[in-house]
Amino acid sequence: MNRAGKFWSTESRLAFLLLIPSAVFLIVFMFYPIFYVFLMSFFKVNKLANLTGFYGMGNYITLFKLPEFWQIIIRSCLWTALAVTAKTVIGLIIALLLNVEFRGRKIARTLIIIPWASSIPISAMLWQWTYNNDFGLLNHTLRWFGLNPPVWLAYPLSAFMANLWVDIWCGIPFMALVFLAGLQAIPQELYEAAEVDGATSLSKFRFVTLPLLSGVLTVATLLSILWTFNDFNVIYILTKGGPANSTDILITYIYKYAFQYIKFGPSAAMAVITFAILLIVSIIYARNFLREGAQ
């Protein structure tokens, strides 16, 4: 037996055998549920989530006729755009500050990790207590300064902004740490050469930092979009989509439609639409990333 055949009969065969449990797990707990949800979106579904008859595009047509569905689509996009923009800008600023030598930098780097190290449900529950009108820290502090604070989670705009801030607060550390890693990978010689040519700090940021950080920015922003668009925990813990569904985004509305209204067909259609939106965004980002890499 030649060497290649011996390798195939020992290491490779063992490797494939070891991969079988992982493959079975993925098929049973990931691919099959995705396939079944896709199937449900084209069928009538009873309250036990059993398919009862082919419905074609009926579930999608039902959704498209609902005014609140389009409102939630717009709100989901607005939520994602505002949150990701804030996370990116604030995270980049923090990374630039942490990339400079100063006393206590290690402590600052440790502190910035705390919101990200804590689980999102715990962070959301802490902020729910902070926003409480009667004994919350935020309103207590505002009253101490003689101000009359609002009931943050009782009105549509203030509830939306309160949810938005918690999502931003939870996501900033990840962006800052990723950007900091990207900044530290940029050779210092490039900055020194730019200084010799008389470049200002703004010029160095524009012509050295941003171009070399573009790949990291693209990947981090894409991940942030995917996570933010599907951020169920923050909204459901703080407001459960209220008041009057004013803070619902697609992911929370899917949950309500499926498990509160027991309408599995339309909720499956919404899940497929969510998947399609995120797939399109991912493809656009991937194409731009590959185009930049080829240049």
Image: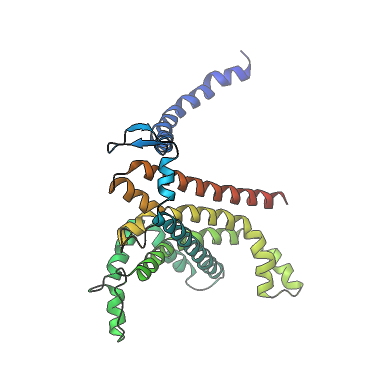
The quadrant of the image that shows the N terminus is: top right
Q: x and y percent of residue 131 in the render?
A: 30, 70
Quarter occupied by residue 193 = bottom right
Front one among 80 and 98: 80
> Can you name the residue that lies furthest to the top here?
1
Front one among 118 and 64: 64
- Please tell me which residue is depicted at 61% across the width and 58% down the height of the picture: 185
Is residue 271 visible to the viewer in this orientation of the structure? no
- Please tell me which residue is depicted at 56% across the width and 53% down the height of the picture: 219
Quarter occupied by residue 154 = bottom left
Quarter occupied by residue 99 = bottom right
Front one among 76 and 41: 41
In the rendered view, tell whether residue 229 sits above or below residue 85. above
Task: Say whether residue 70 is left or right of residue 240.
Answer: right
Q: x and y percent of residue 203 in the render?
A: 69, 72
Picture colour scheme? rainbow
Task: Say whether residue 114 is left or right of residue 4.
Answer: left
- Please tell me which residue is depicted at 35% across the width and 55% down the height of the picture: 233
Q: x and y percent of residue 240 in the render?
A: 30, 58
> Can you name the residue that lies furthest to the left here?
134
> Can you name the residue that lies furthest to the right here?
197
Is residue 171 visible to the viewer in this orientation of the structure? yes
Front one among 102 and 123: 123
Q: How many numbered marks, from 0 up?
A: 0
